[in-house]
Amino acid sequence: MCNELPPHEGEEFGYVITGTVTLLTGATRQKGRAGESFCLHPRSAHTLKNETSHIAKFIWVTDPPIF
């Protein structure tokens, strides 16, 4: 299960430790593999998914915190 995050002020950064993840932002899909990172300004709803059968580990940082 994945929860879609609504648009908000701030920035988000992610780093994929192992596996492959897919970043869904609006109509855009981007894959990130181990050792790759991403940065976004969350102006549209977005989510991060593991669409494989392998374990994926990642770090996701938001500024300001949204929890």
Image (cartoon, helix red, strand yellow):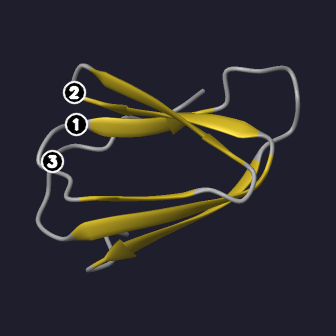
Is residue 1 depicted above or below 56 in this figure?
A: above
> Which residue is more in the foreground, 67 or 20?
20
Which label's residue is closer to the chain start, 2 or 1?
2
Q: CA distance from mark 2 to mark 1?
A: 6 Å
Pointers 1 and 3 in contact (C-beta within 8 Å): yes
Which label's residue is closer to the chain start, 3 or 2?
3
Q: What residue does disc 3 label?
A: 7
Q: CA distance from mark 1 to mark 3?
A: 5 Å
Which label's residue is closer to the chain start, 1 or 3?
3
Q: Amino acid at mark 3?
A: Pro
Is residue 18 depicted above or below 25 in this figure?
A: below
The kind of secondary structure element at disc 3 is loop
Pointers 2 and 1 in contact (C-beta within 8 Å): yes
Q: Amino acid at mark 1?
A: Ala
Pointers 3 and 2 in contact (C-beta within 8 Å): no
Q: Amino acid at mark 2?
A: Gly
- Image coordinates for residue 9, horizontal then vertical, percent: 11, 66
| Numbered label attached to residue 28 | none
How would you rate the neighbour count of disc 3 (Cα within 10 Å): few for under 14, some for 14-19, many for 20 or more? some
| Numbered label attached to residue 26 | 2
How would you rate the neighbour count of disc 2 (Cα within 10 Å): few for under 14, some for 14-19, many for 20 or more? few
The residue under the point 30% across, 78% down is 63
- Image coordinates for residue 5, horizontal then vertical, percent: 31, 44
Q: Nearer the viewer, mark 3 or mark 2?
A: 2
Q: Is residue 10 left or right of residue 5?
A: left
Residue at the right extreme of this rendering:
54
- Image coordinates for residue 20, horizontal then vertical, percent: 71, 37
Q: What residue does disc 1 label?
A: 45
The residue under the point 22% across, 36% down is 45
Q: Nearer the viewer, mark 2 or mark 1?
A: 2
Q: Is residue 30 left or right of residue 64?
A: right
